[in-house]
Amino acid sequence: MIRFIKRIVYCFVGLLTFLLLMYLVAFCVGEPELNKDRYIKLYDDQNEIFYQSINNYSGQYVSLENVNPYFLKAIVSIEDKRFYQHHGFDYVGISRAIKTNVIKRKNSQGASTITQQYARLLYLTNEKTWSRKVKEAFFTLQLETHLSKDKILEGYVNNVYFGHGIYGIENAAQYFYKKKASELTLNEASMLAGVVNGPQYYSPLLHERKAKQRQALVLNAMYENHVITKSVLEATKKQTLNLAKEHSLNENMSTYYYKDTVLQELENLGYYNNQYLNKGLNIYTSFHQKYQDTLNQLIKEKDIQTDLQCAFTVVNPKTSQLQALLGGKDYSKSQYNRALHANRQIGSTMKPLLYYLALENGFNPTTSFLCEPTTFKLENQTTYSPSNFHKKYAYKDITLAQAIAVSDNIFAVKTHLFLGTENLYNFLRNYHIKAKNNASLALGTVNTNIYNLSNIYCNIASTGKYQPIYTIEKITDHQGKLIYQHKNKRTQTLNKESCLILSQLLTGTFNKQFSTYLSATMSNYQTKYTVACKTGSTDYDNLIVAYNPNILITGWVGYDDNRKMEQSEEKVITKDVTISFLNKHIKKESWYYPTSKLNAISINPLSGEFDENGIVYWFRKGTP
């Protein structure tokens, strides 16, 4: 027993000595850099700033004197009630957390102090590694040994996240209540203090009931810490949320999905870390403000009242520059970037990729297959029986030109099986898209996001030249020193002639001459100038890709929870937005020209026979 007690004493003394040594080292290292000069500025294609953040937040830095004391007392009570007593680590809280998590085996309980949270906000990412925890501990000690408690608290409330893209208490007060942080009431202050713990769960705009429950916990904590009386506690709980009628921080929040895409690319390039961020970063991008404004306005005009969501990208095929992006209909309500992260089934937008391979293997605009209900017997002895839209068939041979125009499923599957299913499967692998090598792949039974889909179509729209789409042109630090410069690495990965023939074929989707047993998919729409277009639809998703040599727009509409789209007006949003966008921004005719390896021939679009009054398509020279 005595030996056990000695071991406990030795461990305690060793731990105490280690902590004192750490405090000493943190003190000797010197005052921490609070990164008030740390910034990110994003510039558009006209070198105008469209987004900037100072010290990781957008907005005003306020002193504690300009924050209502109710909020300061509320945040301390709920987040770190011993903040003014401990020296960076709440050992009482740590002991309680260990007891709860390990001994009692209850739900996970943390013990992070405000100082620890502030250190994490200033210097660290959200990665859950031991190295990060060690860094967090050291930065916590450094803050505690050099700054007063009020300075730590001031930095914390100016950096903490409140959801909806809002950082800092002044911004939060403006956004939720249309008032300054100094003007907050107890009701409002306790509500905001509760949001900090989980902005996605406790936002009063998204989850009113949960927000009120969390506010009650904050008020109870304030009462237990003798900050408010019992009568004030009960009276405040009965009050309504008192939120502002409108919620906006600034008009540029509509650009935040694009901003998030840039920051993701910045991280992929290896520059989204403290080594570079602390020096300040000027990031010059391909952002096109007029394109973005048009997308925002068109979606706003749709006035979508349901949970229906959307995503759109606009790319320059000649450069692979991403010029505009929407990741949802309202960033303030959902920061989830669907353009980058929502992997959905792409439907018939797959077919042009299949037909590119067909053109590479001897097909031409007049190649024909019989269109009728068909059951295919596959190599694994199973059968596959696809059907056309509304189960309508021509019951005769149709041309590739018509199959593309009306999006015929039977023609697509026959082409897929004729070529061998591995061809399309391998084609997708070139773009890092994983699919199942099966018969239904021809009809788009693979999931990806529209950013990836745009990347593939950009390869076609650029007549076969490829480099991944991108946003960042160059990066400089606060002294103007060049850190990064994008290098054009476009290479010819697809056959130019096949891309040209395919693009010309995709103009047929607007042509009503093809509307016989099925309608041409874009026959109800007209564009001022020539455009290639392909739509895709499932019960749950609607997609579109449309382009000319200078602009490519890709769109998706659907529900996050994979709910079926029942209303007809929901199913045309992608078409309406895309065509309206193109008609506004295509200023003059800009279309491809056939190379010397191609002949332009007028054909009857239905029979495929030569017709001088028919539609002009491109054929490889020597085509019979």
Image: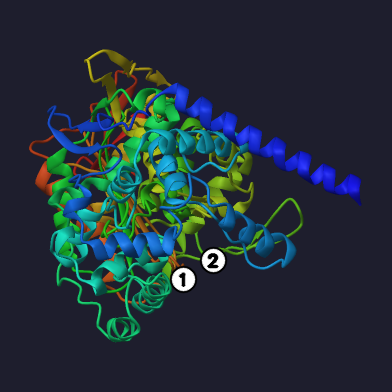
Where, quadrant-wise, is the C terminus in this rendering? top left
Give the number of the disc on residue 391.
Answer: 1
Q: Is residue 279 above or below residue 534?
A: above
Q: Residue at x 25, y 72 (%)?
A: 186
Element on which disc 1 rests: helix
Nearer-the-camera pick, 387 or 572:
572
Considering every residue shown, the one lying at the far left of the view is: 587
Q: Is residue 144 above or below residue 332?
A: above
Q: Position of residue 549 (x, y in %)?
A: 23, 32
Nearer-the-camera pick, 380 or 258:
258
From the image, tell me which residue sits under label 2: 373
Amino acid type at circle 2 is Pro
- Left or right for 159, reference 590: right
Viewer can see residue 605: no
Amino acid type at circle 1 is Lys
Q: For the residues carrying marks 1 and 2, which lies nearer the camera in this image? A: 1
- Left or right for 5, reference 15: right
CB of mark 1 within 8 Å of CB of mark 2? Answer: yes
Mark before the other along the chain sequence, 1 or 2: 2
The residue carrying pointer 2 sits among few (fewer than 14), some (14 to 19) or many (20 or more) residues within 10 Å by Cα, namely some
Element on which disc 2 rests: loop
Nearer-the-camera pick, 516 or 550:
550
Q: Position of residue 604 (x, y in %)?
A: 29, 47
Q: Position of residue 591 (x, y in %)?
A: 19, 33
Q: Position of residue 281 (x, y in %)?
A: 28, 26
- Left or right for 11, reference 4: left
Q: Residue at x 44, y 30 (%)?
A: 268
Q: Is residue 167 above or below residue 212?
A: above
Nearer-the-camera pick, 354 or 129:
129
Q: Residue at x 23, y 20 (%)?
A: 478
